[in-house]
């Protein structure tokens, strides 16, 4: 009995400590800033990148976070998918208010992730309502299409790539077929930012645009020194987890996300938002 009495306070302290740690990992976003050399047509711009909100209640409605985001004064906000969750259909109702607040900061471009695509497939009426809500706010929502904005006097195109569920493979990589990107029909690659939720296909994306933004991997969930992120939703060591990657004349910035979903845990890997400053590579 004495051993049990000693064990219980220790166990309670461990549980409390773990809970506080996870609240910090999910509720206090890290700011990451990148300086990217890209095409002349995209130079001199400032992007705010968010991905994988997954209805995070510690972020949605958090006025302190909004003040931080607003203070960045971006030219445009890029949402690289999975702002909602296919598992949390009631929780999804808190996301439109979050998006509305973002529109008060800067124009917003929002591309589809696998959770948006799954909701469209499984509960089409809820997805249709959600889509109407965000478009009514003036948010651009390219779904395998290209949209444009005038930023700093430049006409900038944004291509939103929506991949079919089959490309979110488990364990074994599926090749990206030509049909997956041919609907985009990007007219001016040199002035295009590609929003592509799943970063694994960066070698294929690099041929489409000089700047790619992505998410999905949640930073690898657990990050270790030298190894980086070690877990992917696809159940393998992910090649792209967080930060900048280059392929030829293209750069991809991968966000570790600002939320979590089916595995709501992070280790040495706080939620984040990314600032991308562009300059000409010439």
Image (tube, grey):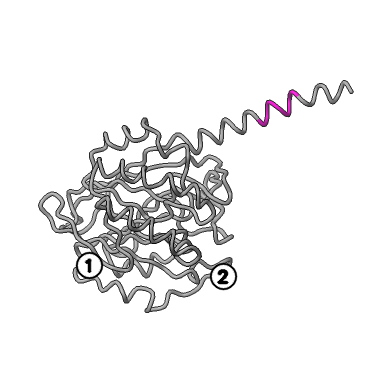
Q: Secondary structure at mark 2?
A: loop
Which residues lie in the magenta part?
9-15
Circle number at residue 59: none
Q: Is label 1 in a helix, a strand or a loop? A: helix
In the picture shown, does residue 105 fall above or below 262?
Answer: above
Q: Is residue 63 magenta?
A: no
Residue at image x 38%, y 57%? 129
Where residue 59 appears, x then y in whole percent? Answer: 43, 38
Spatial CA distance of label 2 from label 1 is 30 Å
Taking the spot 38% from the left edge, 61% from the top edge, the residue there is 128
Residue found at x 20% / y 65%: 190
Q: Is residue 91 left or right of residue 12?
A: left
Residue under numbered circle 1? 189
Residue denoted by label 2: 172
Say above or below: 255 vs 41: above
Q: Quadrant of residue 240?
A: bottom left
Comes first in the chain, label 2 or label 1:
2
């Amino acid at each position: 009995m004495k051993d049990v009495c000693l064990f219980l306070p220790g166990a309670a302290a461990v549980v409390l400590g773990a809970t506080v740690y996870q609240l910090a990992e999910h509720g206090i976003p890290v700011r990451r800033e990148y300086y990217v050399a890209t095409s002349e047509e995209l130079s001199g711009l400032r992007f705010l990148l968010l991905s994988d909100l997954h209805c995070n209640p510690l972020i949605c409605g958090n006025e302190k976070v909004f003040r931080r985001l607003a203070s960045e004064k971006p030219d445009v906000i890029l949402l690289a998918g999975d702002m909602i969750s296919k598992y949390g259909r009631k929780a999804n109702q808190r996301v439109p208010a979050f998006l509305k607040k973002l529109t008060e900061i800067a124009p917003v471009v929002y591309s589809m992730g696998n959770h948006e695509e799954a909701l469209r497939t499984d509960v089409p009426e809820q997805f249709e309502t959600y889509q109407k809500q965000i478009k009514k706010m003036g948010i651009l929502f390219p779904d395998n299409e290209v949209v444009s904005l005038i930023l700093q006097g430049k006409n900038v195109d944004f291509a939103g790539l929506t991949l079919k569920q089959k490309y979110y493979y488990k364990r074994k990589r599926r090749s990206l077929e030509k049909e997956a990107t041919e609907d985009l029909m990007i007219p001016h690659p040199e002035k295009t930012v590609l929003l592509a939720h799943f970063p694994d296909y960066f070698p294929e994306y690099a041929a489409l645009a000089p700047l790619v933004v992505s998410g999905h991997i949640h930073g690898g969930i657990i990050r270790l020194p030298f190894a980086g992120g070690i877990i992917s939703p696809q159940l393998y060591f992910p090649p792209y987890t967080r930060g900048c990657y280059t392929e030829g004349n293209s750069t991809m910035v991968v966000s570790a996300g600002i939320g979590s979903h089916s595995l709501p845990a992070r280790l040495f890997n706080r939620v984040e938002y990314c600032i991308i400053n562009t300059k000409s590579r010439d």
